[in-house]
Amino acid sequence: MTDIPMPTPTNPPLPLPSYKLLSFDIYGTLIEYKQRILQSFKPLRANLPSDSPYRESTPLNPSLDHCATKGDIEFLKLFQKQEDAIKLELADEPRRFDEVLREIWRRVSREIDVQTSDEEIDAFGSVSNIQSWPTFSGTIHALRALQDRGYRLVALSNVDKFATDISFSSTGLNSIDWAKIFTAEDFGTSKEDLQAADQRKFEALLRYAEEQDVKKEEILHVAQSLGHDHKPAKAMGVSSVFLIGDGPVWGKEGESRMAVERGLVGYGWRCGDLREFVGVVEGGGES
């Protein structure tokens, strides 16, 4: 994505040591989950007809190793559609994330018309499945390096406390001295809250920063998702760092270019991953 121009920053970038608080998206930025979802559903997808769009084997980018296929992308869209629908339906009576996972499996199997079993449903919603979602390579070491430089680290998890606690324990994220860990419960549970969930998490972050006497301009949000993180960060006036991460694997170049061209995002730094960002910090701020 190096050929994509940088956007106009939301705020004039400060020297990196001037920021006091670094906030992080968790699932998709620190923790990898898409490949694990696809791996879990592999047996179900194998029972689909060979001409199913969910089995389309054409790679998005043949020049990349381990690139997602068109079928992978269509399946993840189906997964996301079911997850979003369930969360809205259950907004007034939220269920734990493991129960949501089980219901997603049921609905996906019905949608693609493939029979499943209670054992498969329970396995997808199990603690061990959530534990299997790993951090991206080098994440823990990079967070420790930022922690050692005196930044306050804040986690913004869009998943509930039950699952976030499991993930933090299984990945070693609980070894980091987090100043604050936000989970989905902190952002509201009504339908209106869920529909504005991305904005709500930044509102919660800004309230916390104010309580800690940290100015908005001293906050730097670090994330991969343009739509769920960088767009609302710009709308809320929060500076940000875009981690490309595994975006190219999932064909995100077009989305990235469009977001910049339309002025939807205003990140001040763009790095390949969290390790590269640490290198930028240690090198004085040039990305």
Image: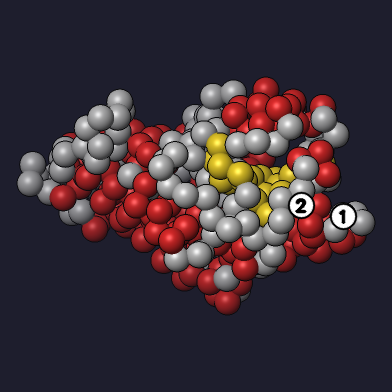
Which residue was labeled with disc 1?
Answer: 214
Toward the bottom, the furthest residue is 192
Residue 187 place in picture, x, y as percent: 67, 63
> Disc 1 residue type?
Val
Circle 1: is it few (<14), some (14-19), or many (20+) Cα within 10 Å? some
- Going from the N terminus, do you reach mark 1 or mark 2 first? 1
Q: Quadrant of the N terminus?
A: top left
Residue placed at 71% from the left, 56% from the top? 12
Mark 1 falls on what kind of element?
loop
Task: Using the rendered view, name the quadrant where residue 278 is placed.
Answer: top right
Residue 250 place in picture, x, y as percent: 35, 42
Q: Is residue 140 left or right of residue 71?
A: right
Whether residue 217 appears in this view of the structure is yes
Q: Which mark is residue 219?
A: 2
Is disc 1 in contact with disc 2, using a CB cutoff of under 8 Å? yes
Residue 97 place in picture, x, y as percent: 54, 50
